[in-house]
Amino acid sequence: MANLEKQRVESKYFDLDDIIAKSEATSCTFEVGELNPDFFPEMLGIVKPTQNSEGYNADVPLWLLESVRTPFSIHLPQSYSLSMQGVLNADARNINLSRQQQHFYANGMHLSHLMKEQNPDGAMNLSRCMLNTLTQRLGGIVSNAAHQRTKGDKFDVLETKVFEEGKRCKEDIDRWLKQDKQAASKKRKRNS
């Protein structure tokens, strides 16, 4: 027991939302050349993957793609497609991200990271789209929280966390202001 070493991990290592987001599968094409044929049955449970002229097609969890050394290309899910990126960049405020992808930002970040070597422009465009989407939606989320409105069903997991934290901060401020007001009232009564 004394020989155990401490191991440093990323801060998000124990983040359940990140773990769930990484378990989402995305469609990929693997180059045939260096791929071990045992990869599909052993790692994915696929006995015989579909093959075309470009390689083997399979749906693979994002966490597994991080460790694959064989060249592959990602087929973006509909939620991150070029047409959806255009819609989100134009006006993302009324899009139901929960319906598009429950972990929209987390999955998008993982996809961008995985794409950056083989498609740097596509990865950059996706990253910019996610940042633009969050920027467009953040004001409305904070406003809803500050006005104590109920959480909308259009939020993804990250936006829900921002909303809940905003509500908590608003409640803390209201409580502090009430205490300050009561203290001022007591002081006036004593001075009268």
Image (cartoon, grey):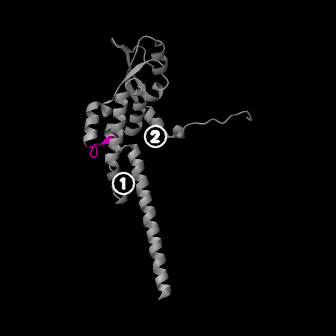
| Circle nearer the N terminus (1, 2) | 2
Q: CA distance from mark 1 to mark 2?
A: 21 Å
Secondary structure predominantly adopted by residues drawn in magenta: loop
- Name the image quarter holding residue 26: top left
Q: Nearer the viewer, mark 1 or mark 2?
A: 1
Residues rendered magenta in the picture: 91-97
Q: Secondary structure at mark 2?
A: helix
Query: Does residue 183 appear anywhere in the picture?
Result: yes
Q: Position of residue 42 (x, y in %)?
A: 49, 17
- Name the image quarter holding residue 142: bottom left
Task: Between residue 3 and residue 86, name the one nearer to us.
Answer: 86
Q: Residue furthest bottom?
A: 192
- The numbered disc on residue 142 is 1
Relative to 39, residue 114 above or below: below
Q: Which residue is mark 2?
A: 17
Left or right of residue 128, residue 178 in this image? right
Amino acid type, callout 2 = Asp
Residue drawn at (33%, 29%) of the image: 77
Residue drawn at (41%, 57%) of the image: 167
Left or right of residue 172, residue 138 in this image? left
Amino acid type, callout 1 = Val
Q: Position of residue 91 (x, y in %)?
A: 25, 43
Q: Residue furthest right?
A: 2
Q: Secondary structure at mark 1?
A: helix
